[in-house]
Image: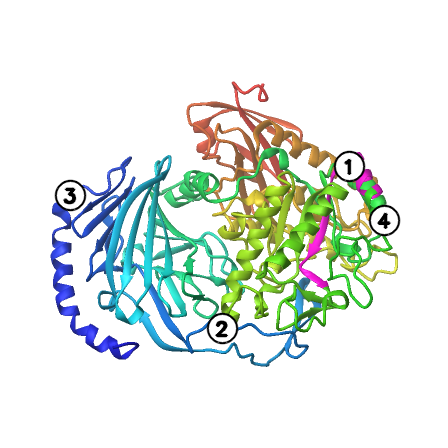
C-alpha cells in the first residue's frame, strides 16, 4: 500500500512503538547517569540508545526500526525539551510518468521585467511578472509525509557508524532504508561534535538507489518542542523583509542557560522558527532525486551556553552575550566560515555609487581617486557604469570590456594602485540580450523564463557553462586590471530557472541550485586568484532590498553587502553637488546623524556574525553648504567601527580641505589601532547599553589580550558626564587609557576599576570618543 492511504495502517503500529519508547526513556538514567560532564566529547551507542556528549551539551537519540527521535537535549543536565524531538520531517512524491522532468526551450513569452526604483531613501525594484505556466512533462503523485509518527512504518535502520573524519571531530552517521512505499530511498543522518566546543552539528543525505524519479519537499532537520522555561528567544541576526534569521538563541528569561540555534541554509530558502523548528522554507524548497542521484542538506547546529547573568553598573551581562562575543565566534571563524587572511584587508573602502551613480568616467574617477588617496582609503571601487553594455542595454548589464567613458581603464587602475589603493570593480549577473538572446534550439546561458533588466538577461547559476563564463570574466578582470575587490550585484536567482539543459528540474529546485551555483563561483574564483576580495550584495543573493547577512554566504564570500542601501544625507543621491540643489543643510546634517545610527543598529542586529565582514552602506562623504561637519565625520568613523570601515560613498569633490584632513586623521587613527591590536575583527557588547541615539552607548574592539579600543557615543539626551564600564578586560591587570578624538590622557586604571565604571567620560549631545586601552606591559601602551 502506498501514499496517504498507507498511513492509516501505520498508525496501528504506534501502540507498540510508544511502549518501546517509554521503556527506553525509563532506562536512560541507567545507561548514562552523568550525561553532560564539562570537558567530555564523545559519542556512545548502547543498544537502541546513542548519547552524544559535547561538553555541557548532550543529546540522546533513540534509533531502531520503530523509533528515531530525541527524548532529551540537555545543557548542564537540564532537559530543554517538553516532549521528544522530531529528527526528520520530509515529504516524498513520485514522478508520473516515471521520467526526468524536462526544461523549457527559449521563448520570449513570460518572464520577469525589472525596473530600478528608490523608495524612502532606499534602493528598490519595480518588478513585473508575466504569469505563464510552463510544463515540465511530469506530474507529482503519491504525496507521502514523513515524521516521527509514521517513520517506523516507512524506514528501517540500515546502519550506525561512529568515525573521526578529522582531528578533533567525531561523527555519528545513522542510515535508514525505506520499505516498499519508497523502495530504493536511503537516508543518512549525520551528527558531528568538535572537541572544545559545546556544539552538535547535523545534516541529512538522501540517496536514490531505486528506479523511481522522486521529489522531496517540506524538509525540516530539527523540530524540538522546548519547555516553557527555555522558550525565551533572542535574535542574533535580523529577520526583516519576511526572511528568517540564520542565528537565534533559545534560553531562560535571564539568558543564563540555553542553546544557540544556527541554520546554514542560504538566503530566503532558510526556515528557523521561534518554536525550535529548523530546516527549509516549505514555500521555496524542493529537490528532485533521480535514480543514482543524491541530495545533501545544508547543516544546522546547536551551540550550548551556560553561566551567570548579572547586572553591571550600566546594563545586564548575560551568559548568552558573553558566549556569542567569545567562544561562539571562535567556533564560527575556526570551523564554519571561510577564513579571511589579514593581508587581504581592504578597509576602508570608497564606493563610487552614491552621487556619481552610473555617470562615472575616467576623468571624474581619477579626480575622485586623488581625493580618496589623500583621505587614506585602501580600496577604490568603481561601481556600475564602467563596463561596455552594448546597444540598447543599460548600466545593469556587465561585460569584461570597459565602455567609451573609460578609454584607458588599465591606466586608471595603475593610477589607483600608484596612490596606494586597490582597484575594485562592480559586476553583475546580467548579460547582453542583443548578444546572447534569441538562442532557439540551443542551451542558453541565461535563465528561462526570461529575466530582463534594461537590455540585459539574467545569467543562470544553474548551468555549468554560465558559471564558467562568469568565473572567466572576473578572473580576466583581475589579471588584466589587477582588480583586488569585486562587488557582485543584481538579482535573478529569486525568479528561478527552467531552461532546457540546465541542472534544475523544477522552478523551486532552481532556487537552491542557483544559490549553490553562486557559492561554487566564489569558491572557484578564490581557488584561481586567492588574493582577490569577493563581496556579494543582498541583491544578487535574492532581491532588493534583499536578505541580511547569514552564515551560508560567509562560508564562501569574503564580505556581504547587507540591505538596505540608504542615502541619508546624500542630498540628490544620484547627482554631484551643485549650487542648484534645493536641499537644506541643517536637514542633511540630521539625516547624516540618522544614517550613522541606522548603521550601528543594523550591525548590532547581526551581532551573531563577525561584523567586520558585513558591509553597511551609508557613510555619506558628501558636503553641501557645511552639512558634513567634523563632528559628523567623527560619528561616521565611530559608527563604522562597530564592524569595519566599509563602505564610504559620496561626492568626494564636495569635500572641503578640512573634511579631507579630518577623514585622513580618522582613518590613520583606525589603521594604527588595527595594526597594533587587530581591532576590526573584535566586538564586545555584553554588560553595556545597546545602540541608541538618545542616551549613551558603547562597545569594545578589544583583542583577546584585552587591548584595543572602546567606542563611546552620546545621543541627543542623557547627562553630559557618564560612567563608562569596560567589563571585557582582566580584573587584575592595570591599563592605560587615551582619548584619541579629544587627544587626552585618561590615566591608568585597574581592570576592576574599569569593571566598576570608575572611568567617567564627558561628551556634548551627539558627541563621541575613541578610547585606546592597553595594559601596562603592552609596548604600545607605555
Residue drawn where x is 52% and y is 66% of the image: 504
Q: Disc 3 to disc 2, how far (Cα)?
A: 53 Å
Which of the image's four quarters has the C terminus?
Answer: top right
Q: For the residue labelled by badge 2, is the local secondary structure a helix, a strand or a loop?
A: loop
Q: Earlier in the sequence, mark 4 or mark 3?
A: 3
Q: Nearer the viewer, residue 472 or 715?
A: 472
| The residue stretch that appears in magenta | 411-431
Q: Earlier in the sequence, mark 3 or mark 2?
A: 3
Closer mark to the observer between disc 4 and disc 2: 2
Q: Disc 4 to disc 1, how far (Cα)?
A: 15 Å
Closer mark to the observer between disc 1 and disc 3: 1
Q: Nearer the viewer, residue 766 or 627?
A: 627
Q: Determine whether label 3 and label 2 are within 8 Å by CB.
A: no
Q: Is residue 319 left or right of residue 106?
A: left
Closer mark to the observer between disc 3 and disc 2: 2
Q: Let me know if residue 435 is in the magenta part.
A: no
Q: Nearer the viewer, residue 603 or 222?
A: 222
Q: Nearer the viewer, residue 369 or 616?
A: 369
Residue 304 higher or lower than 238, as above or below: above
Q: Earlier in the sequence, mark 1 or mark 3?
A: 3
Which of the image's four quarters has the N terminus?
Answer: bottom left
Q: Disc 1 to disc 3, how far (Cα)?
A: 65 Å
The spot of residue 48 in percent (x, y) is 18, 52
Q: Disc 4 to disc 2, how far (Cα)?
A: 49 Å
Q: Is residue 448 left or right of residue 153?
A: right
Q: Residues within 10 Å of mark 3 (few under 14, many from 20)?
A: few
Give the residue pinned by disc 4.
Answer: 362
The spot of residue 363 in percent (x, y) is 88, 48
Give the residue pinned by disc 1.
Answer: 417
The spot of residue 194 in percent (x, y) is 36, 40
Give the residue pinned by disc 2.
Answer: 101
Give the residue pinned by disc 3.
Answer: 33
Amino acid at each position: 500500500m502506498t501514499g496517504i492511504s498507507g498511513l492509516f495502517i501505520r498508525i496501528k503500529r504506534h501502540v507498540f512503538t510508544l511502549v518501546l519508547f517509554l521503556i527506553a526513556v525509563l532506562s536512560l538514567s541507567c545507561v548514562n547517569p552523568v550525561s553532560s560532564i564539562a570537558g567530555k566529547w564523545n559519542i556512545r551507542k548502547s543498544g537502541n540508545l546513542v548519547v552524544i556528549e559535547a561538553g555541557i551539551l548532550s543529546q540522546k537519540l533513540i534509533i531502531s526500526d520503530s523509533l528515531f527521535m530525541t527524548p532529551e537535549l540537555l545543557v548542564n543536565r537540564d532537559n530543554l525539551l517538553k516532549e521528544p524531538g522530531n529528527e526528520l520531517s520530509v515529504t516524498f512524491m513520485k514522478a508520473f510518468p516515471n521520467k526526468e522532468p524536462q526544461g523549457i526551450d527559449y521563448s520570449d513569452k513570460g518572464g520577469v521585467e525589472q525596473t530600478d526604483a528608490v523608495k524612502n531613501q532606499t534602493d528598490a525594484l519595480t518588478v513585473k511578472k508575466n504569469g505563464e505556466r510552463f510544463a515540465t512533462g511530469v506530474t507529482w503523485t503519491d504525496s507521502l509525509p514523513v515524521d516521527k509518527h509514521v517513520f517506523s512504518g516507512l524506514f528501517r535502520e540500515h546502519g550506525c557508524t561512529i568515525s573521526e573524519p578529522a582531528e578533533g571531530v567525531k561523527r555519528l552517521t545513522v542510515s535508514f532504508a525505506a520499505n516498499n512505499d519508497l523502495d530504493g530511498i536511503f537516508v543518512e543522518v549525520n551528527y558531528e561534535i568538535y572537541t572544545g566546543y559545546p556544539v552538535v552539528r547535523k545534516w541529512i543525505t538522501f540517496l536514490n538507489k531505486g528506479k523511481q524519479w522522486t521529489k522531496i519537499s517540506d524538509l525540516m532537520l530539527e523540530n524540538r518542542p522546548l519547555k516553557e522555561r527555555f522558550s525565551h528567544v533572542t535574535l542574533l541576526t535580523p529577520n526583516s523583509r519576511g526572511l528568517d534569521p540564520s542565528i537565534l538563541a533559545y534560553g531562560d528569561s535571564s539568558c543564563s542557560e540555553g542553546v544557540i540555534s544556527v541554520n546554514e541554509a542560504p538566503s530566503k530558502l532558510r526556515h528557523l522558527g521561534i518554536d525550535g523548528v529548523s530546516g527549509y522554507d516549505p514555500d521555496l524548497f524542493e529537490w528532485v532525486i533521480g535514480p543514482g542521484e543524491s541530495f545533501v542538506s545544508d547543516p544546522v547546529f546547536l551551540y550550548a551556553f551556560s553561566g551567570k547573568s548579572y547586572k553591571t553598573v550600566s546594563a545586564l551581562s548575560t551568559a548568552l552575550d558573553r558566549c556569542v562575543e567569545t567562544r561562539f565566534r571562535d567556533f564560527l571563524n575556526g570551523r564554519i566560515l571561510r577564513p579571511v587572511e589579514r593581508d587581504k584587508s581592504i578597509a576602508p573602502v570608497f564606493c563610487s555609487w552614491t552621487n556619481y551613480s552610473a555617470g562615472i568616467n575616467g576623468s571624474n574617477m581619477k579626480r575622485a581617486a586623488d581625493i580618496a588617496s589623500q583621505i587614506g582609503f585602501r580600496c577604490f571601487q568603481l561601481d556600475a557604469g564602467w563596463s561596455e553594455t552594448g546597444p540598447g542595454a543599460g548600466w545593469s548589464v556587465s561585460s569584461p570590456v570597459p565602455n567609451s567613458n573609460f578609454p584607458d581603464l588599465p591606466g586608471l587602475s595603475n593610477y589607483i594602485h600608484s596612490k596606494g589603493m586597490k582597484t575594485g570593480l562592480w559586476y553583475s549577473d546580467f548579460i547582453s540580450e542583443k548578444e546572447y538572446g534569441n538562442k532557439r534550439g540551443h542551451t542558453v546561458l541565461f535563465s528561462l523564463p526570461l529575466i530582463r533588466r534594461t537590455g540585459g538577461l539574467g545569467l543562470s547559476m544553474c548551468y555549468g557553462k554560465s558559471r564558467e563564463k562568469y568565473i572567466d570574466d572576473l578572473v580576466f578582470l583581475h589579471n588584466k586590471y589587477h582588480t583586488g575587490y569585486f562587488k557582485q550585484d543584481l538579482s535573478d536567482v529569486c525568479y528561478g530557472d527552467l531552461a532546457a539543459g540546465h541542472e534544475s528540474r523544477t522552478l523551486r529546485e532552481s532556487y537552491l541550485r542557483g544559490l549553490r551555483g553562486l557559492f561554487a563561483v566564489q569558491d572557484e574564483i578564490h581557488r584561481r586568484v586567492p588574493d582577490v576580495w569577493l563581496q556579494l550584495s543582498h541583491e544578487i543573493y535574492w532581491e532588493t532590498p534583499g536578505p541580511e547577512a547569514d552564515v551560508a554566504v560567509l562560508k564562501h564570500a569574503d564580505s556581504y553587502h547587507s540591505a538596505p542601501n540608504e542615502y541619508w544625507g546624500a542630498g540628490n543621491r544620484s547627482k554631484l553637488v551643485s549650487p542648484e540643489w534645493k536641499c537644506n543643510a541643517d536637514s542633511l546634517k540630521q539625516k547624516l546623524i540618522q544614517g550613522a545610527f541606522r548603521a550601528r543598529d543594523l550591525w548590532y542586529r547581526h551581532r551573531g556574525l563577525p561584523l567586520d565582514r558585513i558591509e553597511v552602506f551609508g557613510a555619506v562623504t558628501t558636503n553641501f553648504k557645511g552639512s558634513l561637519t567634523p563632528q559628523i565625520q567623527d560619528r561616521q568613523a565611530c559608527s563604522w567601527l562597530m564592524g569595519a570601515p566599509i563602505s564610504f560613498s559620496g561626492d568626494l569633490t564636495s569635500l572641503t580641505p578640512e573634511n579631507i584632513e579630518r577623514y585622513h586623521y580618522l582613518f590613520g587613527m583606525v589603521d594604527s589601532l588595527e595594526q597594533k591590536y587587530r581591532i576590526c575583527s573584535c566586538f564586545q557588547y555584553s554588560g553595556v547599553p545597546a545602540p541608541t541615539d538618545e542616551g549613551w552607548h558603547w562597545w569594545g574592539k578589544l583583542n583577546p589580550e584585552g587591548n584595543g579600543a572602546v567606542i563611546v557615543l552620546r545621543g541627543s539626551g542623557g547627562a553630559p558626564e557618564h560612567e563608562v564600564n569596560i567589563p571585557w578586560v582582566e580584573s587584575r591587570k592595570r591599563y592605560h587609557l587615551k582619548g584619541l578624538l579629544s587627544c587626552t590622557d585618561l590615566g591608568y586604571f585597574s581592570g576592576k576599576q574599569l569593571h566598576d565604571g570608575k572611568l567617567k567620560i564627558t561628551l556634548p549631545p551627539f558627541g563621541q570618543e575613541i578610547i585606546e586601552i592597553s595594559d601596562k606591559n603592552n609596548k604600545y601602551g607605555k
